[in-house]
Image (tube, coloured by chain):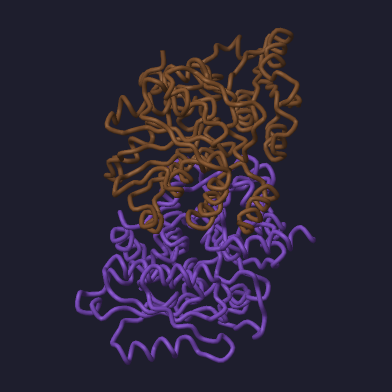
Chain colours: A brown, B purple
């Protein structure tokens, strides 16, 4: 069970290890969207995304003997970096199974953090099977990207911080917009805010072709995305909601929004100029939902989680050029 | 006189009005430079640079009758935005005299914040004379960009915050690297840190062709830059140190470093990928000094002030392309 207590325990483990990322506000953006927007800047987290929180909590919760066996994970990139950094801080080995088309920056950073990276072909390989094979061969412990209680509880610490930060600036928020891939981040955050700020409506935001959580919420059961689709939001192109995460999100969320690649690209560029933050496409979907008019604030206050910033200059420039052509 | 007390008064005025910007650390950067680096992210300040602090403190310290007359300033862009935002929060009129080749983003933002912008030709006009003329015609109060006790005291609040933030992370710092244009920021910050953290060595960093403060420190008197030079660091291309700022900096600083446009361009790009922060060229000179080897840390701890982030996408892309060609 993931409760505010297990999230509180995760928060105690993380203190002094992670970055208490700021909650930032920009008058000009408030004027533009007709409400108040508070950005939780998780792109400034260790390894450039929220993923460090869940990975660290999982590894910290293992006993010494388990931990000594090392860890293994599968990830498109951000979770791999989070696991690598957390493993490094415990001085244990880590292996990450990553698609061979993952952003170069993410593969490089995972290696630089000391993890062994195993690349696979996204069209033919099964990343989970490859990772599970490694756990059987080496005895290493699996740190799944989302469908795990300790991982979800770690991501949920963002919900505690947001609540504390909203109190500090005396800003009661109405809405929280959070990216969803496998749904671990929003499952943890919504569990925390339901306990601490029950009036807050939590919505997921996803790429148009990968709106599995949105559609699953409507159907009341897990549905997968059409195969073969693409999106610039590499961090959140999961095929289907997790079992555990969907169960939580089904109970907690008020709904969801889908945004197009073009809306996301435009949001990344606007965030660059208006917030002075580098946000990767998958991290910018919440702001894209506000700017595209998918959700109108009408004077209300929204917290927008900017979940990561791992976009390299070449990828960023490509996005900029695409935007210029439109 | 600018003292820790007048800076403390400025801090009391600013509380709740400004952003308490984070002090950020990145393991990978520590490894790269062979020491510990803590970035004071003033690019996340209101209006995208530290300038809001000094402008707000100046305007807040006026009495109601003075303030009602409105304010006027001259600035290449960041100070103009700071004055415009501060004036807006007091609901008084502001006029900014800006060069006609200032970055478009800075002119747009100053106007958007409600200030009247008067453009002049940098080669033929005298911005101070134009601004002083306006004060005589309209009775508006001048908010100078650096040579003013209240402006310097406002910028100095960064020194108080840095001291508190270093204590919170238990990181005694050895060195502080701070950009210098007219020298107001570093004059205020060094006055605060001399009082609160006297062991900290404060160094200015400037563009190679605009190292007037560096050379003035060595000569013991104010010297000007050669006319007709250019730099990508538009925020800090002042012709000569201020009278008041130089007097303070001469007493407080341990020295200074100069960096080339190429080193700055490279620093801007590295900061994008490594810190997830958008930093304008003039704000990136401190990191450029570390990365170029102008200063070797040898295991010491440095605070680097990232003073602003007002670079637009077109300018950023130009910098990126220049870098790619090298």
A117 to B108, vertically: above or below: above
Q: Looking at the image, which residue is at 73% across and 34% down? A: A101
Image spot of residue B241 (x, y percent)? 53, 78
B262 to A152, vertically: above or below: below
In this view, the residue farthest toward the left is B65
Image spot of residue A50 (x, y percent)? 52, 34
Point out the image quarter for the N terminus of chain A.
top left
Does the image show residue B100?
yes
Q: Which of the pair B191/A58 is nearer the observer?
A: A58
Point out the image quarter for the C terminus of chain A.
bottom right
In this view, the residue farthest toward the right is B326
Q: Looking at the image, which residue is at 38% across and 65% down? A: B154
Q: Looking at the image, which residue is at 66% across and 59% down? A: B288
Q: Which of the pair B292/B234 is nearer the observer?
A: B234
Is B326 placed left or right of A4 in the picture?
A: right
Q: Which of the pair A147/A40 is nearer the observer?
A: A147
Is A249 placed left or right of B284 in the picture?
A: left
B282 to B95, vertically: above or below: above
Please tell me in which quadrant of the rendered image residue A189 appears: top left
Image spot of residue B114 (x, y percent)? 36, 71
Please tell me in which quadrant of the rendered image residue A227 appears: top right
Is B265 placed left or right of A33 in the picture?
A: right
A81 to B19, vertically: above or below: above
Image spot of residue B53 (x, y percent)? 39, 64
Count how many numbered circles sit on residues in the image: 0
Does the image show residue B221?
no
Q: Looking at the image, which residue is at 28% across and 87% down? A: B139
Please tell me in which quadrant of the rendered image residue A46 appears: top right
């Amino acid at each position: 069970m993931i409760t505010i207590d297990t999230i509180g325990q995760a928060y105690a483990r993380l203190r002094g290890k992670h970055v208490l990322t700021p909650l930032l506000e920009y008058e000009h953006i408030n004027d533009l969207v007709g409400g108040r927007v508070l950005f939780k800047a998780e792109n400034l987290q260790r390894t450039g995304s929220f993923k460090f929180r869940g990975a660290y909590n999982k590894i910290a919760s293992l006993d010494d003997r388990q931990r000594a066996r090392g860890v293994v994970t599968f990830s498109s990139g951000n979770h791999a970096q989070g696991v690598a950094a957390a493993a490094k801080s415990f001085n244990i080995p880590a292996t990450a199974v990553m698609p061979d088309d993952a952003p170069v920056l993410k593969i490089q950073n995972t290696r630089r953090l000391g993890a062994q990276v195993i690349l696979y072909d996204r069209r033919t390989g099964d990343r989970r099977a490859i990772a599970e094979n490694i756990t059987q061969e080496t005895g290493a412990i699996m740190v799944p990207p989302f469908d795990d209680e300790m991982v979800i509880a770690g991501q949920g610490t963002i919900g505690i911080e947001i609540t504390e930060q909203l109190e500090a600036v005396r800003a009661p928020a109405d809405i929280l917009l959070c990216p969803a891939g496998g749904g671990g981040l929003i499952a943890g955050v919504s569990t925390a805010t339901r306990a601490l700020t029950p009036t807050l409506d939590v919505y997921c935001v996803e790429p148009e072709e990968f709106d599995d959580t949105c559609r699953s919420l409507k159907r009341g059961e897990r549905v997968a995305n059409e195969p073969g689709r693409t999106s610039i939001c590499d961090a959140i192109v999961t095929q289907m909601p997790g079992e555990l995460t969907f169960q939580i999100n089904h109970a907690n969320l008020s709904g969801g929004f889908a945004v197009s690649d073009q809306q996301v690209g435009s949001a990344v560029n606007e965030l660059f100029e208006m917030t002075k933050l580098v946000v990767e496409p998958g991290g910018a979907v919440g702001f894209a939902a506000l700017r595209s008019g998918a959700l109108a604030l009408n004077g209300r206050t929204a917290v927008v989680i900017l979940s990561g910033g791992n976009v390299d200059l070449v990828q960023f420039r490509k996005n900029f050029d695409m935007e210029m052509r439109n």
